[in-house]
Amino acid sequence: MNENILTNSCSFKDVTPIMMALPYPETRVQEKNTAYADLLSNDYAGSVSEMSAITQYINNENRLSCDRCPLAKTIIGIAMAEMIHLQKLGELIFLLGGDIDFIAKQSNGRYKMWTPQYLKISDNAGEMLQADIESEKAAIDQYKRHMKMINDKYVNAVLARIIQDEEYHIMILKALLNN
């Protein structure tokens, strides 16, 4: 019997989160504010959100790991940083008195559950990286808009720190795209 066994030799055991080497501010809030929690629910699980970023990065890594291991390792390292962002947002939402779920609370009072339809899926590495860059830019813009709407210095300090990681991710993704 002639077997053609396929394997993936790309190992992720030494991969760490790719993020700025700066501490995060303490996760705290001035007071409960469910309106702020609702805003952050969009960053947590909206169309432009950490949940979308994580899922898109994981999907891209899966599509790349067999043939482009170094690129896949970088992508999974970025996904790990996005997981930390999701965790920080969850803490803030909880402290603000909101619900930790996968529902983005819209300003019009409607709710939208997170869906993979938010993702940009491609088999082409260049298209993946371009979509990831666009997603990072959209996240930064959304965080900045939310910071203008949130009058809580503690929440905004965490969001500003997350933005630093997102800007770093754009720099790395652009370098990968140009290679």
Image (tube, grey):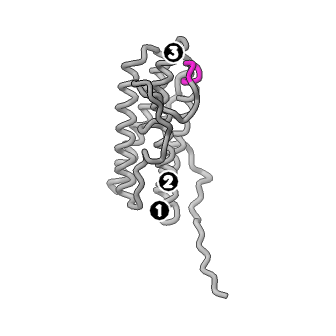
Residue bearing mark 1: 68
- Up the image or down, 29 lies above or below 85; here it is above
Residue at 51%, 53% (x, y): give it: 73
| In this rendering, the label closer to the viewer, 3 or 1 | 3
Residue bearing mark 3: 33
Residue 78 lies in magenta, yes or no? no
Lower sequence index among marks 1 and 2: 2
Describe the element under mark 3 as helix, strand or loop: loop
Residue 94 lies in magenta, yes or no? yes
- Up the image or down, 16 lies above or below 26; here it is below
The residues colored magenta run: 92-98
Q: Are marks 1 and 2 in contact (CB under 8 Å)?
A: no
Residue at 55%, 14% (x, y): give it: 32
Lower sequence index among marks 3 and 1: 3
- Gap in Å between the C-alphas at discs 1 and 2? 14 Å
- Residue 69 on image: x %, y %: 50, 60
- Residue 65 on image: x %, y %: 51, 60
Residue at 43%, 28% (x, y): give it: 106
Q: Residue furthest top?
A: 31
Q: Is residue 124 left or right of residue 96?
A: left
Mark 1: amino acid:
Arg
Residue bearing mark 2: 59
Mark 3: amino acid:
Asn
Describe the element under mark 1 as helix, strand or loop: loop
Depth check: give the residue in front, 96 or 9: 96
Q: Residue furthest bottom?
A: 1
Q: Residue furthest right?
A: 1
